[in-house]
Each structure stands twice: as structure tokens, then as C-alpha cells.
Amino acid sequence: MVSMQLPRQQRRKLRRDLLERGRKALARPLPQPIPDDEAIAIVLALHDILADASRDNPASRLADSAEALLDKTMSRDVKGLDYACRKGCGWCCWQRVACTAPEVFRVAEWMRANAGRQGVPTLATIEAAEAAGASGTGPRLPGSAGVGAERQPCALLIDNACSIHPGRPLGCRAVLSMSAEACRKAMVDPATAEPVPLIVTGTNAAEVVRTLMCAALAARGLSDVGYDLQQALVVVLPDPTAEARWLAGEDVLAGVRKGERPPVARAAQQGLVDLVRALADA
């Protein structure tokens, strides 16, 4: 771990060196395990993306960088594995999705850029899904029993495929299963289903990337909580200024269902936050 017990001039040089290292690290898969200095360097590079006033939509660019880092890491880790996830298999999409505000803004940005294309949902689509879910009149999981009978699909699941696949959040990118049938059983009748054989390297990598991204957010004084994607899109999608206002400190997602980071994850990121703030102030 780098030491902050250094004169300001040395800390400035350390910051420059780590920032350059972090930018290079974002261009390749995460090492396993990730060294402490590398983690700090990546958080510093992500923090710099948020701090760059010359960028358009820096929160969305932060999500872009985090998603690309996870994609590169997973591509390396699952190479040669015959996993079951394919277009047309949407069992894991029959649940709510939680993600950070930058990921919400990134999804909204992608949807605006692709508005009008066949298969891309609209604000009305998402609002209708929200209303149907609240009233209990939405579609139900085919063949489900017990708890599974209450499940409803993500509003972005169209024709059993993710309609925003290129812009999907970290949590969606991380889930890869070796058995579609196990996923089906887990959703249809979770009380009797066997554990889903997930590729744990993907979920582990996603948690590391999420911690690095949340550390960058917290170091900038921004919220690192998880928001319900569907509810958040109802707020953000019709308002292209939402991201800028959020970055300026306005709680534009105040009414959206949210969940705090787990204490263990928050503790892991706090040390990174303290070091990055000390370096950023050098």
C-alpha cells in the first residue's frame, strides 16, 4: 500500500505516476489478485474521469470505463468455457436490477442515442411496466409456483432478450451460468431448485470493479448506493439534464428505491477513498 506520509511534492509525483498506471490498467483485464497499488491507481483514474470538466457526461463515461474493464476481465476468465447464456435465454431477467447512478445515466444515454430503433424500449414502455407491477397486472413467469409466481420481467426484457445489451449495468454483465435449466428452475420454483452453477470469476470480478468505481464516486463526494434501474429510468430518461444536476450535488433520484452498499464492501472501499482523496489534494 502506498504511504501518504510524504511531502506534497512527492505525493504529486506519486499521483502522476499512479494516474498513468491506472489509465493503462483500465485498458487491460484486472490482475488476479489485484495488488493494492494497482487498485489505488485504477480508482484514481476513474476519479479523474469524474473530475474532468471537459468531458461530456462524465458519470456515464465512468460507467463506460468500469463496464469495459469488467468485460475485458470476464473475456479472459471465461475463455473456453461452454456457458449457457445466449440471446433468447432471459431467466435471470425476471427480477429487479440495482445499479449505481452512473450506470443508470449510461443506460438512459444509450436509450436516447438508439431511440426509434426496433426493439429499443421507450419511456412509455417502462412506465407501463412499473404501473403493471404495482397493480399486479403484469406478465407472470411461465410455469412458476410459489414465490416464483410473483416474479415479473425487467421492463428492458423484450422478446426474451435484453433490449439494452450493449449498455447494460455491471450486475447484468457479471452473471454467467453453466446451466440454463438450473436458472429456469431457480426462477420458476426457488423453493425446490438446486444452486445455479454461476461462473464465480465473473461475479467476483464484478464486485471488485464495483468497489473500485464506488470508491471513485465516494472520493468525489457522490452517492455510491444502488438504485432500482427501472424506477430510476422513469426519472432520468425524460430529463437529459439529470446527470449534470446529480454531479452538481442535486439528489435527482431521491424518490427511487435504493439499497446501501454492504458493510464489508463499504469497508473495503473506504481505505481506497482516503488514499485517493489524499492524492487528489496533493
Image: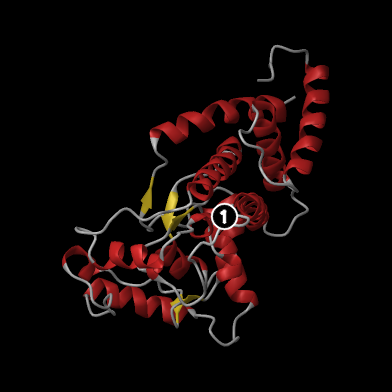
Determine which quarter of the picture holds residue 11. top right
Q: Secondary structure at mark 1?
A: helix
Q: Is residue 118 left or right of residue 8?
A: left
Q: Position of residue 203 (x, y in %)?
A: 49, 48
Q: Which residue appears at 50% of the width and 30% of the height?
A: 268
Residue pushed farthest left? 146
Q: How is the image coloured?
A: secondary structure
Q: Is residue 264 left or right of residue 72?
A: left
| CA neighbours of label 1 inside 10 A, class few (<14), some (14 to 19), many (20+) | many
Label 1 sits on residue: 102
Q: Which of the pair 45/52 is nearer the observer?
A: 45
In the depicted structure, whether residue 205 falls above or below residue 267: below
Q: Which of the pair 278/146 is nearer the observer?
A: 146
Q: Which residue appears at 29% of the width and 65% of the height?
A: 185
Q: Which residue appears at 53% of the width and 50% of the height?
A: 202
Q: Position of residue 12 (x, y in %)?
A: 80, 24
Quarter containing the N terminus: top right
Does the rendering let one see residue 259? Answer: yes
Quarter containing the C terminus: top right
Q: Amino acid at mark 1?
A: Pro
Does the rendering let one see residue 240? Answer: no
Q: Position of residue 224 (x, y in %)?
A: 50, 44
In the depicted structure, whether residue 199 falls above or below residue 109: above
Determine which quarter of the picture holds residue 218. top right
Q: Position of residue 125 (x, y in %)?
A: 43, 81
Q: Which residue appears at 58% of the width and 31% of the height?
A: 273
In the depicted structure, whether residue 206 falls above or below residue 132: above
Q: Which of the pair 13/69 is nearer the observer?
A: 69
